[in-house]
Image (cartoon, grey):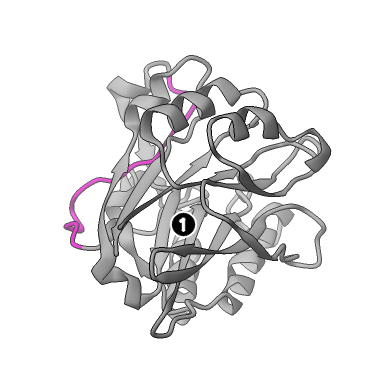
């Protein structure tokens, strides 16, 4: 069987519900993980999603900020809504589901952006981001003969040189500073996660999932960053059949500054 999963920082699910509906109708992933839903749980738009066949919805939201949601055509079991850095915000949700013969533990993350100043001594938002990534070391890629793990989301760090439009110019810009990229990769390796988007993709190939609202013509300038990620446990790599970055979604009406990433697996 085939299994598909998408991740997308939607930047307000209620504001951009028409885009979510269009995406689900056009691409029909089995699971969609949203970040930055900016929606309290009692106001989440369940009805239009269930109308499209996505009956199983797990949410972890709050008013006006942050928030994650996992929307599925397959039954879900909520495993955890983890609290990070002793702060009560909505940045993590894990569920368990069955995809064919495989049981999958799926983590949906929204990592703090970190503000503008890349100095943890003077910027508490940046300190929070570094502490959050450090605490993510506890999230391991669990696996055995019948189960696997996937971690997706807006992780707000572009770790490799060609995950940004200009490595040299962004070394002092939050999301690509050396302290972020080194701690990020150390965390990924400690959890034994595989970066599927870079699996079998040359390091020199540019990959972007985000383009700033500040750009007058985002498409022409193409100053992107890879802030959205798809990771898995090692035992899921043989089943990974590829991914698609929906760059065109950045040009949709009233878009998010992130675009969907769609990953596919064969079992």
At horizontal 38% and vertical 85% (from top left) the residue drawn is: 145
Q: Quadrant of the N terminus?
A: bottom left
At horizontal 73% and vertical 35% (from top left) the residue drawn is: 44
Q: Which residue is at the front of the view, 207 or 267?
A: 267
Residue 80 forms part of the magenta stretch = no
Image position of 219 (left or right of 227): left
Give the residue pinned by disc 1.
Answer: 177
- Main SS of the magenta segment? loop
Residue 206 forms part of the magenta stretch = yes
At horizontal 47% and vertical 51% (from top left) the residue drawn is: 172
User: What segment carries the magenta color?
Assistant: 200-215
> Residue 160, image x and y in percent?
33, 58
**Residue 171 vertical position relative to residue 50 in the rendered view, above or below:** below
Q: Which residue is at the front of the view, 171 or 234?
A: 234
> Residue 191, image x and y in percent?
48, 78
**Residue 114 vertical position relative to residue 99 in the rendered view, above or below:** above
**Residue 193 vertical position relative to residue 120 in the rendered view, above or below:** below
At horizontal 24% and vertical 70% (from top left) the residue drawn is: 238
Image position of 65 (left or right of 207): right
> Residue 148, image x and y in percent?
43, 74
Secondary structure at numbered mark 1:
loop
Categorize mark 1 by other alpha carbons within 10 Å: few (<14), some (14-19), many (20+).
some
Q: Which residue is at the front of the view, 47 or 138?
A: 47
Inspect this view and state whether residue 120 appears. Answer: no
Inspect this view and state whether residue 237 appears. Answer: yes
**Residue 101 vertical position relative to residue 62 in the rendered view, above or below:** below
Q: Quadrant of the C terminus?
A: bottom left
How many discs appear? 1
> Residue 259, image x and y in percent?
43, 35
């Amino acid at each position: 069987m085939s299994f598909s999963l998408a991740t997308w920082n939607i930047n307000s699910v209620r504001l951009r519900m028409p885009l979510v509906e269009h995406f689900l109708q056009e691409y029909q992933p089995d699971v969609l993980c949203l970040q930055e839903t900016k929606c309290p749980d009692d106001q989440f738009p369940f009805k239009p999603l269930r109308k499209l066949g996505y009956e199983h919805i797990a949410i972890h939201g709050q008013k006006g900020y942050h928030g994650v949601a996992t929307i599925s055509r397959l039954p879900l079991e909520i495993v955890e809504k983890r609290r990070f850095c002793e702060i009560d915000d909505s940045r993590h949700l894990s569920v368990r589901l069955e995809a064919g013969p495989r049981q999958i533990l799926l983590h949906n993350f929204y990592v703090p952006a970190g503000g503008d100043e890349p100095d943890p001594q003077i910027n508490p938002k940046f300190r929070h981001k570094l502490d959050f990534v450090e605490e993510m070391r506890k999230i391991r890629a669990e696996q055995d003969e019948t189960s696997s793990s996937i971690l997706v989301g807006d992780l707000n760090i572009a770790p490799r040189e060609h995950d940004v439009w200009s490595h040299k110019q962004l070394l002092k810009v939050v999301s690509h500073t050396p302290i972020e990229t080194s701690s990020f990769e150390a965390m990924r390796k400690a959890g034994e996660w595989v970066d599927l988007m870079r699996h079998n993709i040359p390091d020199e190939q540019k990959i972007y999932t985000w383009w700033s609202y500040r750009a007058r013509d985002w498409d022409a300038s193409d100053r992107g960053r890879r802030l959205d990620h798809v990771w898995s446990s090692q035992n899921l790599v043989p089943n990974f059949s590829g991914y698609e970055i929906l760059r065109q979604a950045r040009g949709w009406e009233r878009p998010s500054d992130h675009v969907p990433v769609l990953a596919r697996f064969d079992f």
